[in-house]
Amino acid sequence: MVRVAADLQLDRTTYESLYRTMVLIRKFEEMVQDLFERGHVHGTTHLYSGQEAVAVGVASVLGPQDRVAATYRGHGHALALGVPPQQLLDEMLGRKTGICGGRAGSMNVIDLEHRLIGCFGIVGGSIAAATGAGLALKGTGNVAVAYFGDGTTNHGYFFECLNFAKVLELPVVYVCENNLYGEFTPWEDVTAGRIEARPEAFELPVQRADGNDLFAVRDAAARALDHARSGNGPAFLEVMTYRYVGHSRSDPGKYRKPGELDAWRKRDPLLIGRQALRERYDASDEDVDRIVESARVELVAAREAGLAAPFPEPGPVDEFKPA
Ligand SMILES: Cc1ncc(C[n+]2csc(CCOP(=O)(O)OP(=O)(O)O)c2C)c(N)n1
Ligand SMILES: [Mg+2]
């Protein structure tokens, strides 16, 4: 596989913008949780806090015609792809101005304009959708990316789709975000052997990366995308990361091992990102604080506008017009 030193290609302005997106995702999720608790967000929420470097790192090396399928934990992926925070928030709030007209809510966001072919509440749905997209993209030089969790690697879709993609040499990159838990269960308790041994059995090239380090994710994703884009078939990436909040809405996360959360907080992707800004780009703490503040200000305004936005008219959904 071609080795791409992706980190060498990041100038300070570009990296600052990636760091800002990670901050935006963290603050967006905090705001959604707050709005959920106040009764403004209906259904449920699955937050991405802690995993930001994965979505932002992979998105940073995607091409304009690539496609992405994510899960119910998809707010971060949407933001990383460039879905406007205001429209995403309005969607969470069920407003007409939402990215899906207020009809999708937290779990099922889709935005074809920004390459997001869907977020799927069905575990493994993202794998199937991206594999189908890979079939459509074969020979075009574009790639489909599937995000999914550790627990998903025990579902039928996983095995069927990896086999199918390899047999047809489809341009798909499978990104397993191993956040150590599937709902409330440690992944080792329900997973035989190593996750990466599974794609290896189908002869996909496999990489493991530190999912809290944007540079590590970006470097590995660039290599996997390059492999798939060059007509060599699918590739697999397992990134190790951690979600700070419960699986969904009110889960207090009591199943965590003692000290585990604190240990991961010390390797927070935003902390690593701040250090990188300081050490690699010579930014001062004040420079970084300004970036954080600008994301905060944007979301405060979005919250106010979102809560004032109109709800969709009751009745059947408008005719769906595929792009
Ligand atoms: C087909 C199917 N089975 C079960 C569920 C219930 N469910 C929702 S999330 C989840 C755990 C998935 O864990 P993982 O793949 O590790 O993703 P994470 O939530 O950690 O991001 C389960 C079992 C579902 N949504 N769909
Ligand atoms: Mg998981």
Image (cartoon, rainbow, N blue to C red):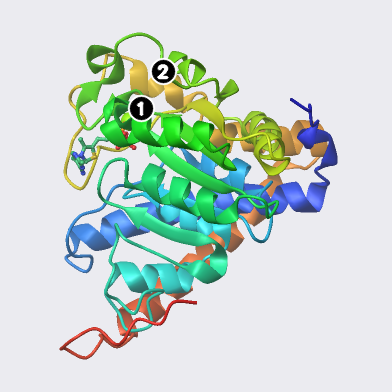
- Of circles 2 and 1, the one toward us is 2
The answer to which quarter of the image holds residue 255 is: top left
Q: Residue furthest front?
A: 167
Q: Position of residue 151 (x, y in %)?
A: 29, 28
Q: Does residue 264 show up?
A: yes
What residue is disc 1 on?
Answer: 150
Gap in angstroms between the C-alphas marked 2 and 1: 8 Å
Q: Amino acid at mark 1?
A: Asp
- Would you place residue 180 above or below residue 22 in this image? above
- Horizontal relation, residue 260 to residue 176: left or right: left
Q: Secondary structure at mark 1?
A: loop
Q: Does residue 292 show up?
A: no
Q: Position of residue 19 (x, y in %)?
A: 64, 47
First-in-chain label (2 vs 1): 1
Q: Amino acid at mark 2?
A: Ile
The answer to which quarter of the image holds residue 308 is: bottom left
Q: Name the residue located 19 percent from the left edge and 63 percent from the top edge.
A: 38
- Horizontal relation, residue 70 to residue 21: left or right: left
Q: Residue furthest top?
A: 193
What residue is disc 2 on?
Answer: 195
Q: Secondary structure at mark 2?
A: loop
The answer to which quarter of the image holds residue 81 is: bottom right
Q: Residues within 10 Å of mark 2 (few under 14, many from 20)?
A: some
Q: Is disc 1's CB within 8 Å of ligand 1? A: yes
- Would you place residue 273 above or below residue 109 in this image? above
Within the displayed image, which quadrant is ligand 2 positioned in? Answer: top left
Q: Position of residue 136 (x, y in %)?
A: 54, 56
- Would you place residue 135 above or below residue 242 in this image? below
Q: Name the residue located 23 percent from the left edge and 65 percent from the top edge.
A: 41
Q: Name the residue located 64 percent from the left edge and 37 percent from the top edge.
A: 273
- Would you place residue 246 above or below residue 203 in this image? below
Asked if the residues shown at circle 2 and circle 1 are in contact, with their CB atoms under 8 angstroms apart, the answer is: yes
